[in-house]
Structures are given as C-alpha cells and as structure tokens.
Image (spheres, rainbow, N blue to C red):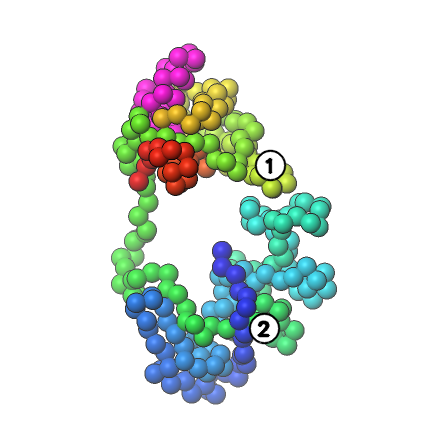
Amino acid sequence: MLYIKNIRLESRWKGSEDLMMDLTRVEFDGTQRKVVFHGDCFEMHAVCKAMCCREWEVVISAEEYASGLYEAEIVCTLTDKACSNASLQCINRWYRVDKREDKSCVYLEENSCRIYAERPRVCRDFLCKGGWRLDSVFPANSAPPDWKPPTLTKETFVERLTEDMTFVLHPLLKVHTVFYLKPRNEIIFIKEMVGVCGKFNTRDSFDSPQMDDARFMALIGLFGSKEPLGRIYRHYCAQSTSLLTLKEFYEIVWLLNKHNVVLDSRNFKGMLGGMGGLG
C-alpha cells in the first residue's frame, strides 16, 4: 500500500476554460519510469486528473477520526478489514477516509476535493513534485486487450518442485483447523495472524478422495520439521493410510503455498541453512 505523507498539496479547480497548461512542463523520465509535472497543482490539474485522490489510502490521525469531520473507517493493517480490537493501543490499526467502488476518495468530485478547505493533514502535506511512478512499461493501448501479467500456474509450480526443496510453515500465521467439504469440492482454512485479533478464513476449490480434515492438519504439522519435501512426503505416507502419489502431494504443497500456510524457504534468505526452493 502507498501512503501519502510528508509532502504538500496546493490546488484549486476553476474549470478547464481557465487552464492554460503548457505541455512542455510534462516530462517523461524513462530511466526512472515516471512522469514529472513541472508546475504547481493548479496548472497540472487538467492532466493529472487528481491522481493523488485515486487508488491511494488517505490515512488520517486518531484525532481527526474522533473529530467526526470525515467519512472514515478503522481498519486492520494486516487484514485490510474493519478493526475489531477494542484496545486503542493496537499497533495494527489505522484510520482511513472512505473510498468509492472505483477506489477514489469519497470527497473527490469532478477531479476536485469537495472538502478542500477542511481536508485532512495528510492531504495538506502532499506534493507530487518528485514525479509519478508508472505501473507498466506498456504505452497506452499498446498491450493486447487480453494481456495479463504472467503468473505461476499450478502446473508450472508442480513441475518445478523437487524432493530436495524445502517449504516451511509461515512464521506469522497459525492454521487453527481445516474444513474439507468433499461434496462441494471446497476446502476452508481457518487462520490467525500474529498480532491480529480474531480469526479469518480463506477457501479454494479442491478435490482429493485421499484427504480429509485430520489428514490435512497432520500434513501441515510435518512442515514444522523444516525438512525437504521428499522426506515430508515419505513421513506422511508412513504415518497415514492415505495413498497420495508424489504428484498429488506436490499439488497440496501448491495449495498450501497459495494460501500462505507454507512458504519457500528461500524467502528467508539463508536463515535456514541454505535450503533449496522454488525460483
């Protein structure tokens, strides 16, 4: 997430008929992959279209939230959901201005701030003089309509796994239980993050006649040994009546990794003794 702070915003909106913007003030810096506006906010407003009021989180102080001046919510920084912790000392809470479905600030109207005179401190301190970073190297409309960023599919993930690779339990996450709903081919992980009040769940499609709730929990527990995948697979087969093939086991590793239950040991940068991992 991107925070808006430590910079200043100066803006007024008078309508496009009053804006005489010199396009030579817009600079594209290819080495830094960003666009720089050489002018004040009022002069650049016709081009930037209030970019600072879109997408980003507008985080306000506890005092501003308590004032009742803003439409805002209390959110857990770890789950991005409404905060349910009664303690005011929780370090994982923040206060942010509400957003519309398109992620723009609720106070943005026709590229102008509806409460500009009383805008939050974070907005008063904002400045974009350093330029805007670009999210993609594709020029507008140059990518195919169906283009999507490449992702590591289950098939590719499984193909890259070898018995000497090591996956470990997520150090900041605890799995309380697993519900495998076979008639619906659905699995639900009940989890809790360190420092977060309350449990949450993630779910996925899954189909394996060999697995059930207890076997899943037993298999997850074996990853606490920090052993290579081959050893975990053999340990599981030795202690369970489940006849998983190695490929089926790898597919479960993919599922557990997808839901952050287990992680590639290389994410820990050698702390586990230079174990192998997925590139």
Q: Is residue 264 visible?
A: no
- Quadrant of res 204: top left
Residue 102: image location, x then y, percent: 49, 60
Please tell me whether residue 275 belongs to the stretch shown in magenta. Answer: no
Image quadrant in which the C terminus is located = top left
Which image quadrant is residue 219 in?
A: top left
Left or right placement of residue 78 versus residue 220 in this view? right
* Residue under the image location 64 percent in, 77 percent down: 117
Q: Which stretch appears magenta?
A: 229-256
At x 40% / y 17%, what residue is drawn?
235
**Magenta segment: does it hold 243?**
yes
**Mark sitting on residue 199:** 1
Examine the rendered structure and indicate whether residue 119 appears above or below residue 75.
Answer: below
Disc 2 is placed on an element classified as helix
Spatial CA span between label 1 and label 2: 37 Å
- x and y percentages locating residue 177 in the rendered image: 55, 27
Q: Tag 2: residue type? A: Arg
Q: Which mark is residue 124?
A: 2
At mark 1, the secondary structure is loop
Asked if one can make out residue 128 in the rendered structure from this viewpoint, the answer is yes
Q: Position of residue 50 (x, y in %)?
A: 49, 72
